Image (tube, rainbow, N blue to C red):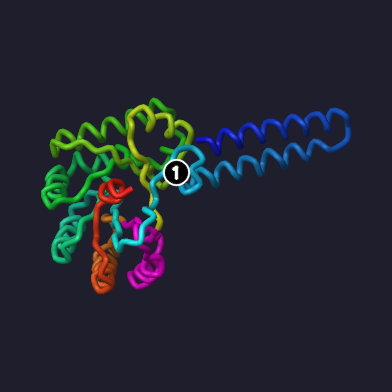
């Protein structure tokens, strides 16, 4: 949030200077138009880049030399793929973190229970995950977060303080809501783009090129590529003697 406040301060200062120069007829009004245009472009990029920490501090990796790594799954639970994911994780004695959507929890509460029974961590991924959720007010964000928290508690008896923004979009309104709810914003250091690429080989290659101790891998357990990609990643990580842990474990290490 400090970065955002500094940006607003400097942005406003230079905006005033440009207006003064325009008033004195030293420059054209088009300088102001261009300045505002590029200023909002930068804000848009910052909203999509959690590692910049512009609006809220996001946990994206653990600085460590220990061969620990966290695999995370977004957008579930999914009746077709989540059970297969759980079976693979059990086969490789791996733990993971599932950032679940509230609406999916309502539809498949037994899957959420199965996730916790197997010893995996649960995170909040909003209730609706709507395409326009990034434009939400603080009040709307609070409804999204608190409703999903309530479903997690009602279904599993457990509480979570992990939150991952849908699409990785952060805003001042979300930052304010997370401060109220006291959630930790969790990002990633290794994005698979499995919602974009359709080839399991391409996705696996992209992930494995970015493997580092303390990293957080982003996958989605509602994608058809999830199972072959996960199995390949688990095989490689096991051969390289990595321990697969939850995001909670990484935060505890921190």
Left or right of residue 18: residue 82? left
Where is residue 227 shown, x and y percent of the image?
A: 24, 65
Q: Is residue 209 above or below residue 114?
A: below
Dot 1, crowdedness within 10 Å: few (<14), some or many (≥20)? Answer: some
Where is residue 96 shown, x and y percent of the image?
A: 23, 54
Q: Which of the two residues, 55 or 231, is positioned nearer the viewer here?
A: 55
**215 inside magenta stretch:** yes
Q: Which of the two residues, 36 or 237, is positioned nearer the viewer here?
A: 237
Q: Which of the two residues, 27 or 210, is positioned nearer the viewer here?
A: 210
Left or right of residue 53: residue 214? left
Where is residue 12 shown, x and y percent of the image?
A: 67, 31
> Which residue is pictured at 28% across the width and 53% down the height?
73
> Which residue is pictured at 31% across the width and 61% down the height?
66
The magenta stretch is 190-219
Q: Which of the two residues, 180 or 140, is positioned nearer the viewer here?
A: 180
Q: Is residue 183 above or below residue 118?
A: above
> Which residue is pictured at 49% across the width and 47% down the height?
48
Q: Is residue 96 above or below residue 203?
A: above
Q: Is residue 174 above or below residue 246?
A: above
Query: Which of the 4 quarters of the picture holds residue 136?
Result: top left
Q: Secondary structure at mark 1?
A: loop
Residue corresponding to mark 1: 169
Tell me, yes or no, if residue 104 can be seen here.
yes
């Amino acid at each position: 949030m400090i970065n955002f406040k500094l940006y607003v301060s400097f942005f406003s200062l230079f905006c005033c200077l440009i207006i003064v120069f325009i008033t004195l007829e030293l420059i054209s009004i088009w300088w102001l138009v261009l300045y505002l245009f590029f200023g909002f472009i930068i804000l848009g990029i910052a909203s999509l880049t959690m590692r910049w920490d512009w609006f809220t501090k996001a946990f994206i990796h653990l600085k460590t030399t220990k061969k620990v790594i966290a695999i995370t799954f977004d957008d579930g639970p999914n009746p077709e793929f989540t059970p297969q994911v759980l079976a693979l994780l059990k086969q490789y004695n791996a733990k993971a973190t599932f950032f679940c959507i509230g609406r999916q929890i309502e539809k498949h509460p037994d899957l959420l229970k199965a996730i916790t029974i197997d010893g995996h961590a649960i995170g909040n991924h909003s209730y609706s995950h709507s395409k326009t959720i990034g434009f939400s007010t603080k009040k709307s964000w609070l409804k999204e977060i608190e409703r999903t928290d309530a479903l997690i508690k009602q279904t599993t008896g457990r509480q979570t303080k992990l939150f991952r923004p849908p699409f990785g979009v952060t805003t001042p309104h979300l930052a304010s809501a997370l401060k109220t709810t006291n959630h930790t914003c969790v990002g990633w250091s290794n994005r698979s783009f499995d919602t974009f690429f359709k080839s399991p080989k391409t996705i696996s290659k992209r992930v494995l090129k970015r493997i580092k101790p303390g990293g957080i891998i982003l996958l989605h357990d509602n994608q058809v590529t999830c199972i072959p990609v996960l199995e390949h990643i688990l095989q490689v990580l096991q051969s390289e003697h990595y321990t697969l842990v939850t995001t909670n474990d990484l935060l505890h290490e921190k």
